[in-house]
Amino acid sequence: MSKNGSKNNNKKPENGRKMTRHHLLPASRGGLTDQYNIVTIPRRYHESWHIFFGNLTPQEAIQFLNAIFLGEGRKQRRKKWTMESLYELQLTIQKQTISIEKKQKKKKQ
C-alpha cells in the first residue's frame, strides 16, 4: 500500500512514467509491505533491477557489483563471468546475508 493508501501498483505521476513498488527486502525473503520496506520507482527500473540483481537487497547488490568489478586481486577482475557463475554469486551473497541475520537474531534472544 502506498503512502496515500492506494493499492495501485502502477501509478502514473505527472512526468508520465509508470511507477511501481519495489521491496527493499524482497517479500519472498520475508520483507514486509510497509513504508520502511517499499520504494516507488519507475517500472522499467524495477524490471531492470530484477534482471540484473534478482532478489538481492540494495546492500547485496553492492557486494555483487564489487565482486564482479573489483574482485579479489587482478586474477578475479579478468574472470570470464557466465550467467551461471553470476547466478551462483547472487545465491552465495544471499546465503551470507541470511546467515548473518540468523546469528544476529540468536544474539538478541
Image: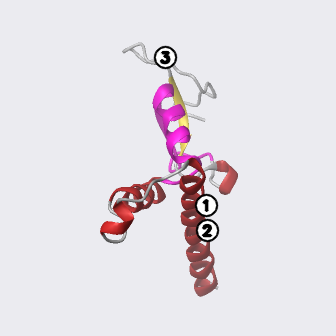
Q: Write down the residue under mark 3.
A: 12
Q: Work out whether mark 2 precedes mark 3 in sequence or the reverse, and give the earlier one.
A: 3
| Residue 13 appears left or right of 82 | left
Q: Write down the residue under mark 2.
A: 95
Secondary element type, mark 2? helix
Q: In the displayed structure, would residue 17 be above or below residue 97? A: above
Q: Are marks 2 and 1 in contact (CB under 8 Å)?
A: yes
Which image quarter holds the N terminus? top right
Q: Nearer the viewer, mark 3 or mark 1?
A: 1
| Residue 35 appears left or right of 30 | left
Please state which amino acid type lies under the numbered disc 1: Leu
Q: Could you tell me which residue is drawn at 35 percent across and 68 percent down?
A: 75
Q: Could you tell me which residue is drawn at 37 percent across and 60 percent down?
A: 66
Q: How was this image coloured? A: secondary structure
Q: In the displayed structure, would residue 17 be above or below residue 79? A: above
Residue bounds of the magenta highlight:
33-57
Secondary element type, mark 3? loop
Percent of width and height locating residue 48: 49, 34
Please state which amino acid type lies under the numbered disc 3: Lys
Please state which amino acid type lies under the numbered disc 2: Lys
Q: Which is more toward the observer, 51 or 7?
A: 51
Q: Which is more toward the observer, 56 or 5?
A: 56
Q: Which is more toward the observer, 100 or 80?
A: 80
For residue 75, the mark is: none
Q: Write down the residue under mark 1.
A: 91
